Amino acid sequence: MYKVDTASALREATEPGVITQNILVSLAIDQGPRREAGRLFLEDGIELDGLKEIRIEFLNILNIDHLWPLKNLVKLSLSHNVIERIENLDELVHLRELDLSFNRIKIMENLDNLDQLEILLLYSNEISIVQGISNLKKLIILNIGKNKIMDWKHVIYLRDFKSLRSLNTCNNPCTEIDGYLDYLFAFVPQLIYYQYRMISESERQSAIDKHYRIISNLEENETKVQTELALQQELKDRLALLSASYVEYLDEDYLFEQMFSLDEVGRKLYTINENTQNAFEEYKKTFSAICHELYELGLQEHDKRTEEIRLFECVVNEGKENKQNVARKIVDEVFEKKTEIFTNIKNVMTALIEGREGEANATHDITAKATELYNEFNNLLFKARNQLMSKEVILHDQMEDINEVFRINMMDMINLFLETARGYFSLLRKSQAEYNNTIDELISHYISGFADEVHIPADLKDLCGDKDTLITTLTASHDVHLQVINNREELMVNRLNNWFKDYMNQLIVNENKRNHQQILEISHFFGFLEQEFKLLSPSQELGLTDIGLDDILED
């Protein structure tokens, strides 16, 4: 348990330094809950990851560090320090407000992970370039006033932040150049406030009128860029869907083209004459049709798996929610009864003290009453703890059963899909064999038309100058095609099976982690109640040294 003296801990920062555990705990205690319960949690170091807001100000902090325990922080102020570099904030992914004003920061950097950030305050630093915040698309308020920003490039940069509503760039060299505000108001139309003052419609329209032609060209270029990005995203999303369906590149002629891209001999053979070219086109048509059917099947099976997962998660979440509701009711009853018992105990202790000063004969009855109340509280905790643990054991068993049912259902679904898919790959191999036979017949007939080998074109002699050479050539081409088909089948089977294996393993890990965490929370909850119970009053005053929670809770 941390025993932190707030004043001494904060004195650690009188010399330029880093953030320490003691500083964090001290500030959390000083700025956090005032009730004794809140203080106990923080001193145990348990609830640092539950803090939503903290101010680390005026502490001469030089380096940002040791903030990883504050994973759920929403608001952080590090203003009025001597910080020179933005760093070590990657873990604070829930942060919405960050104040780094009045420091010595020169570069805007290491902010990419803070994509939930809505307010960024960097007033009074040494920043010369606005950069490093491209991921902060939810940014609403940005204050970069009183820095060393010289040019206007930041205006176009900030144009992309469509959620930006308030900006402050005052006391930067760039603002002293005539026309800056017009340029800013015209090219960042989403702004509503500048230096926390609302921009009037007349100011904005006047600025737009001055830069109308440039704005028109800029908007035209932006539209083209956005269209291109939308197309790229559409293709990316489509590929992601096909990949998740394990049928990527099966909707077009990719697999067919891949076979012939690896088969130079095959490309030469199908161009021998019109008949071989027609056979090739027919083969391509048949092959692609089979691929497309497999592609459609893959999408359908992906939808089935997605729906199965959705139904599974609904059942799991319902089970967890039902258990949480029951647990919440048990805990509420404990707190309600605890309040009543603690009030009665305090009344008994008061009566005991008054009895010792007055009638000594009343002591025995009062002590008996106190013993009864202490036993009642012990029994309350014992019963509630058993109830919560029992509910958690039942839920864990149910989750394991549900996981097993899901595993069986999903395995059956996957096996059926793979069995059907293997049938399609067999059709692809069959079509390849038929094409190989057709080409053999067509080329053999073509070669037989020549009087002798001397008249066969030179570029064909090495490929099909005689029957044995033709057979060898076609066999090599056939093997290349089969290898491509077999590899694609193996890829589908292995990827789908590996996904299923990893998914089930992760379900087990997640459930065990949840179960372990719940048991720890229950144990900690009753440990806290026990501690609160012991702190209520020394049992020696009532002659209750033989009464305690430890023995009962251990049972």
Image: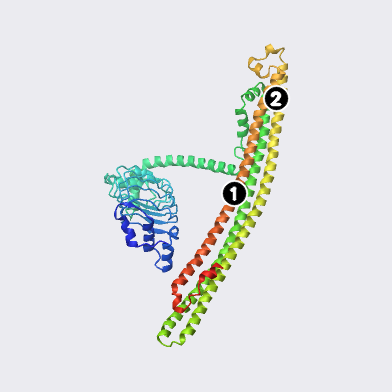
Give coordinates of residue 100: x percent, y percent. 34, 52
Cα distance between the residues tagged 2 and 1: 46 Å
Q: Is residue 418 left or right of residue 203?
A: right
Quadrant of the frame with the N terminus:
bottom left
Tell me, yes or no, if residue 166 can be seen here: no
Which of the two marks, 2 or 1, is nearer to us in this view? 1
Mark 1 secondary-structure assignment: helix
What's the residue at 62%, 43% (across, down)?
Answer: 496
Give coordinates of residue 326: x percent, y percent. 57, 67
Residue 176: assigned label? none
Give coordinates of residue 138: x percent, y percent. 43, 51
Residue 45, located in which quarter of the rendered image? bottom left
Give coordinates of residue 30: x percent, y percent. 36, 63
Residue picked out by circle 1: 503
What's the residue at 63%, 36% (across, down)?
Answer: 488
Q: Is residue 436 left or right of residue 137?
A: right
Residue picked out by circle 2: 439
Label 2 sits on what residue type?
Ile
Q: Nearer the viewer, residue 298 or 390?
A: 390
Q: Nearer the viewer, residue 287 or 217?
A: 287
- If you read the primary sequence from the N terminus, does the residue marked by circle 2 or circle 1 appear first? 2
Residue 358, located in which quarter of the rendered image? bottom left
Tell me, yes or no, if residue 533 can be seen here: yes
Label 1 sits on what residue type?
Tyr
Q: Neighbour class for label 1 at 10 Å: few (<14), some, many (≥20)?
A: few
Q: Neighbour class for label 2 at 10 Å: few (<14), some, many (≥20)?
A: many
